[in-house]
Image (spheres, grey):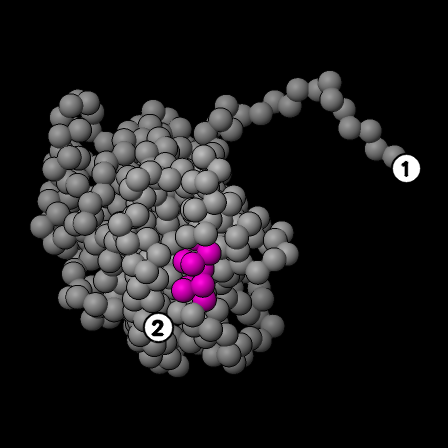
Amino acid sequence: MSTTIRTDIRLPLAARIEHLVGSVIDSSTSLLAEQTHDIVRLAMGSPAQDAIPSAALAAVPLESHAFDYAATEGDPALREALLAQLAGTSDETTSDRLTITSGGMQGLDLAHKLFTDPGDLVVVEAPTYTNGSATALSYSAELLEIPVDEEGLDVERLEAEVRRTGRRPKSIYAIPTFQNPSGATLSLERRIRLIELAREWGSILIDDDPYGLLRFAGDPLPTLHELAEGDPLVFSVRTFSKTVAPGLRVGWVDADPSLGQLLINAKQAMDTCTNLPAQRQLAGFLDSGGFDAHVTDQRIVYKERKEAMRAALTEHFDGRATWTDPDGGFFLWVTFDPPVDTTALFEVALAEGVALIPGNAFSHGGLFPHAMRLCFASTPPARIAEGIARLRRAVDRLVQEGR
């Protein structure tokens, strides 16, 4: 039986579809899967495959009841294990503040579902993780992009822009530690001032911190969660995607207890509950005591890989570009001078066998046409060196072609 597709029917799509902008970052996963030649993958922000504790996760016994529905707020076994893991850290919390989520992205979606109305002003960093800003846009927010420098979000510029526009932001979306994509860390002075401004304006401070545990240099700073001392305006989003495995899709939200039932109600309209087998695997991994040693090992590996990438960039791009020097996390932010169109570079680089993410993927307003993000975490040092050499060949090709 053949099926004829009707082309004369206009679907009654919702007005919000014009705000569903998608993700250049995530789309690169599908694009890379289609490639048949060797590619050094410096694009996606994933942990190293050899850093994922797959054997330890697989060793956690999963009985038949582990494949049932779970409590919306999170399986008790994981909640208890997570609370114990966080005890004594800068993210220590209590059970009534905790909601287990399907990755960090669901935490961001929950924040905007609860707080963002159409037309609300949402502050985002520039550059930023645009999956986060895309979530705000999906709820019809208006974005105010504020620059990031070596000390993170420029809080003085934020104050000036709010005065200039005469509009108080409904929320402020910040990645305070080893920011994606710049690798910058918000200074202590700016952290304190940002919380003060949120209180002054009555703005929700969405504290997205996937990388904070991956510090391999410098002294740790208190999280926004700790500095806020339970202030209900601070909504903290966390994930196991960067420290354990992204495919588990498990994270958590730390929020004022008054939001607990609202978070449950909102989540029940999304996915009913977070993947229970993955929750049980993580609970077993945390209970085994293996998490701390695992993260310690990751820090050593990622420090070596960051240094390998910086050395390769110096060899091939000294005087041609500048790049950041983060104390942790996954990323370097590279800016070309003289300028290089990194959107055009993406295609040429892929042909040369190296993947990157163009700078404009990290700004709703397209503010970074001559920058790019490189992930050092997922690639061994020798492959990083080869990838940067291929990248130089791609830049030379682009210049020769006059693009």
> Where are the magenta residues, as a range?
383-391
Which of the two marks, 1 or 2, is nearer to us in this view? 2
Instruction: Identify residue type, mark 1.
Output: Met
Query: Mark 1: which secondary structure?
Result: loop
Taking the image as shown, residue 14 lies to the left or right of residue 207, namely right
Q: Which residue lies furthest to the front in this view?
A: 400
352 drawn magenta = no
Who's the residue at 34% across and 67% down the image? 308
Mark 1–mark 2 Cα distance, whole angstroms, equals: 57 Å
**397 or 234, which lies in front?**
397
Spot occupied by residue 255 in the image (x, y as percentages of width and height): 28, 51
389 drawn magenta = yes
Taking the image as shown, residue 47 lies to the left or right of residue 154, namely right
Q: Mark 1 points at which residue?
A: 1
Is the stretch drawn in magenta largely helix, strand or loop?
helix
Who's the residue at 23% across and 36% down the image? 146
**139 or 355, which lies in front?**
355
Q: Please say whether residue 37 is visible from this viewpoint.
A: yes
Determine crowd level at label 2: few under 14, some 14-19, many 20+ residues with C-alpha closer than 10 A.
some
Q: Mark 2 points at which residue?
A: 301
Spot occupied by residue 380 in the image (x, y as percentages of width and height): 42, 69
Q: Quadrant of residue 240?
A: bottom left
Q: Is residue 299 above or below residue 391?
A: below
Query: Mark 2: which secondary structure?
Result: helix
Mark 1 or mark 2: whose residue is earlier in sequence: 1
Determine crowd level at label 1: few under 14, some 14-19, many 20+ residues with C-alpha closer than 10 A.
few
Instruction: Identify residue type, mark 2.
Output: Val
Q: In this view, does 120 lie above or below 356?
A: above
**185 or 344, which lies in front?**
344
Who's the residue at 41% across and 64% down the image? 384
Q: Dividing the image into 4 quarters, which one contains the N terminus?
A: top right
